[in-house]
Amino acid sequence: MSGLLSGARTAPNPLRQLTIDQLRQRTSLKWQEYPDDVLPLWVAEMDAPLAEPVALAITDAVARGDTGYPAGTAYPQALAEFARQRWGWDGLAVERTALVPDVMHGVVEALRLVTEAGDAVVVNCPVYPPFYEFVAHAGRRIVEAPLGADLRIDLGALEDAFRRARAGGRPAAYLLCSPHNPTGVVHSTAELTAVAGLAQQYGVRVVADEIHAPVVAGGARFVPYLSVPGAENGLSLMSASKGWNLAGLRGGLLVAGPAAAGDLVRVPFGVSVSTSHLGVIAHTAAFRDGGEWLDALLTGLDENRRLLTALLAEHLPAIRYQPGQATYLAWLDCRALGLGDDPATGFLDRGRVALNSGLAFGTGGVGHVRLNLATAPELITEAVRRMTSAVG
């Protein structure tokens, strides 16, 4: 498995390889949503070239005309080996996985397995906005369990939410974001074990969105939910999408704990076969051969977190920023700036920099913005300059 183990950096920083002119030639959402005078640091796309092993796998498949339906177990096998090497977890059983088109569609399928229309789904707000959108589209209702002041899971709030979700004896699920988006928090073994205990106590099924699992900062360790005691009936969604910038090459895996294996039998065949074959090829190559590229990326992201911390301290000290242990997203508390409930509007209108509005992240998002760190250091510096001009 080439480059899988963390070690000395041997690849160039992917975030320093593209110019802004090259980036503006992209036709994907991040660089097309706003006019050219706007600097886009919003949606979770990386400003990096594709990892070479992934690019080669795709182009080889295209050269063969290998563009049919997905088959085989290469993808879960690659992820299982990655999990052993990176996270020290050998509990990902290939036979307890199912292909899904992408993580959020997999979340919906998982919720359909463990709840019925009208049932409650607990989330830790502020949280990834599609949680609200996809849960509503699936006919379920959201019950919020706000994060604590330290941006970590508040077990008291979670227990209260579980109690409310299960009122009347109806089934309920907990949609766990791990690592957490937008805060970048990596949940500890103790926290996840406590979560599993509460879920058992209240009869709540846990569905973990672990899409950001490969993107963990130096010194931190990702803990798969299914690896902790009591999580045997949990379900997890994983993919290489965030780690290797593969949103346009869709492919996710639904992973079941030992006690949830029977749930996978009920995943419709049409769901798995709807997964992109090229996506499966790309994600397999990323987990199997993309470790060196990932290590270089993680080093670059650590540098960018330090850069943003220093820039804010110098130019916008009123912004509160707690660098995350994971993801390439920065959650900024701008309430002291006097820009109102939605500072992203002011930064866009007056600074011409696009960030995600905190309002879409649910309770706790007022006065916040989310900034995408997966870009060149020069663009982060320019973004802070523009944000400063919007405040002044």
Image (cartoon, rainbow, N blue to C red):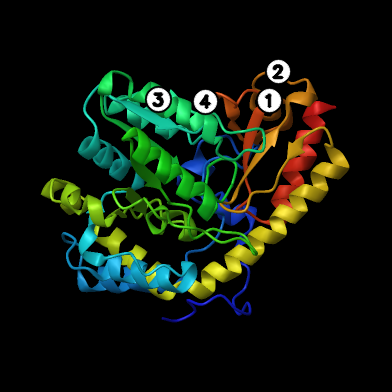
- Determine crowd level at label 4: few under 14, some 14-19, many 20+ residues with C-alpha closer than 10 A: some
- Estimate how packed mark 1 is, as few (under 14), some (14 to 19) or many (20 or more) residues with alpha carbons within 10 Å: many
Q: What residue type is labelled 3?
A: Arg
Residue at 55% from the left image edge and 39% from the top image edge: 153
**Is residue 189 or residue 138 the one in the foreground?**
189
Q: Earlier in the sequence, mark 3 or mark 2?
A: 3
Left or right: where 264 falls relative to 251: left
Query: Which one is in front in this view, the residue at disc 3 or the one at disc 2?
Result: 3
Q: Earlier in the sequence, mark 1 or mark 4?
A: 1
Q: Which residue is drawn at 27% across and 37% down?
A: 111
In-image side of 289 versus 171 (left or right): right
Question: Is the Cβ of the residue at disc 3 closer than 8 Å to that at disc 2?
Answer: no
Q: Where is residue 235 in the image (x, y as percent from the top left)?
A: 31, 48
Q: Quadrant of residue 164?
A: top left
Residue at which label 3 appears: 163
Cα separation, mark 3 vs mark 1, equals 35 Å
Side of 269 relative to 22 (left or right): left
Q: What element carries label 2?
A: loop
Under circle 1, the secondary element is: helix
Distance from disc 1 to disc 2, alpha carbons, whole Å, reads 6 Å
Q: Distance between the residues labelled 3 and 4?
A: 20 Å
Residue linked to disc 1: 343
For disc 4, the marked residue is 362
**What residue is at 55 percent from the left and 23 percent from the top?**
363
Residue receiving disc 2: 340
Asked whether 113 or 138 is in front, the reply is: 113
Q: Which of marks 3 and 1 is nearer the N terminus?
A: 3
What amino acid is found at the position of numbered circle 4 in the picture?
Gly
